[in-house]
Amino acid sequence: MKRFIQTLLVVSFFISASANAELDKSELKKVLMESMPSLVVEEKNISSSEIKGLYEVMVGANIYYVSVDGRYLIQGRMFDLVDKKDLTEEKLAVAKAAMINAVPLEEMIIFKAPMQKYVINIFTDIDCGYCRKLHSEIDQYMAEGITVRYLFFPRAGKGSDSYKKAISVWCADDRAAALTAAKSGTTPPPEKTCDNTVDKQMALGDELGVRGTPMMISPKGYVYPGYMPAKQLVEALSQE
């Protein structure tokens, strides 16, 4: 709990504004965008937080807490110590759910469970060891009723061998079979290219805070980083 409180109190940025002057949402948006031009803030995503004197600002899949005078910005998590809830995580899950559920099914490589009970979206890298381990057990996930929806996130970045393999898999006649072969160590034809969604998926991964692979996101927006055996994942999904 000490670490939680320390995180909550970390002040990440100083924003110039008139001291002690309470700003309305439009004024706060202006201050934020003037101080941090790269930050895209929409007025509809600014709201009062559970703590008096702090605005809550949603930017993509991130939440910031800003003092009502626009001077201080806190980057961290807010906890309700009475109800023992991570208030920030609950709201982030809603935002992440909206983003991941907006991806058209035809832009994913899907391994559908015969008797589907759950769905999990997985950002994957063909050359990632734990991604390969997870995929080697794909039949176990499907047997547990988990439909797996893959999105590409080659960690080495655009232009890397992993990136080229992702494009080649996407451009294959049978994407699922090509992905399975690639994750088994078969190198897909590097010259095979077509219109693809790899860059779009990587950009979405960046927005959602993907830092490593595999990274799993449920349709409810909850994140499960790293490899997780099928039965363990079922237990986690059943408790959402």
Image: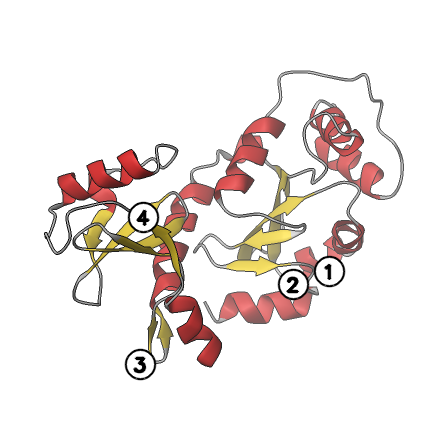
On screen, residue 150 above or below 11: above
Q: Residue at x 24, y 52 (%)?
A: 71
Q: Amino acid at mark 4?
A: Met
Dot 1 crowding, Cα within 10 Å, few <14, some 14–19, many 20+: some
Q: Which residue is mark 3?
A: 83
Query: Looking at the image, is mark 2 or mark 3 nearer the viewer?
Result: 3
Mark 3 or mark 4: whose residue is earlier in sequence: 4
Residue 60: x %, y % from top left? 39, 43
Residue 177: x %, y % from top left? 78, 35
Say which element carries label 1. helix
Q: Which residue is mark 2?
A: 144
Query: Looking at the image, is mark 3 or mark 4 nearer the viewer?
Result: 4
- Residue 114 seen in render: no
Q: Residue at x 53, y 34 (%)?
A: 203
Mark 4 or mark 1: whose residue is earlier in sequence: 4
Q: Which residue is mark 4?
A: 58
Q: Which residue is mark 1?
A: 140
Say which element carries label 4. strand
Q: Please report contact status of discs 1 and 2: CB closer than 8 Å, yes or no.
A: yes
Horizontal arrangement in the rendering, residue 55 relative to residue 237 (left or right): left
Q: CA distance from mark 2 to mark 3?
A: 33 Å
Horizontal arrangement in the rendering, residue 121 relative to residue 49 (left or right): right
Q: CA distance from mark 3 to mark 1?
A: 36 Å
The image quarter in which residue 162 lies: top right
Mark 3 or mark 1: whose residue is earlier in sequence: 3
Q: CA distance from mark 1 to mark 2?
A: 6 Å
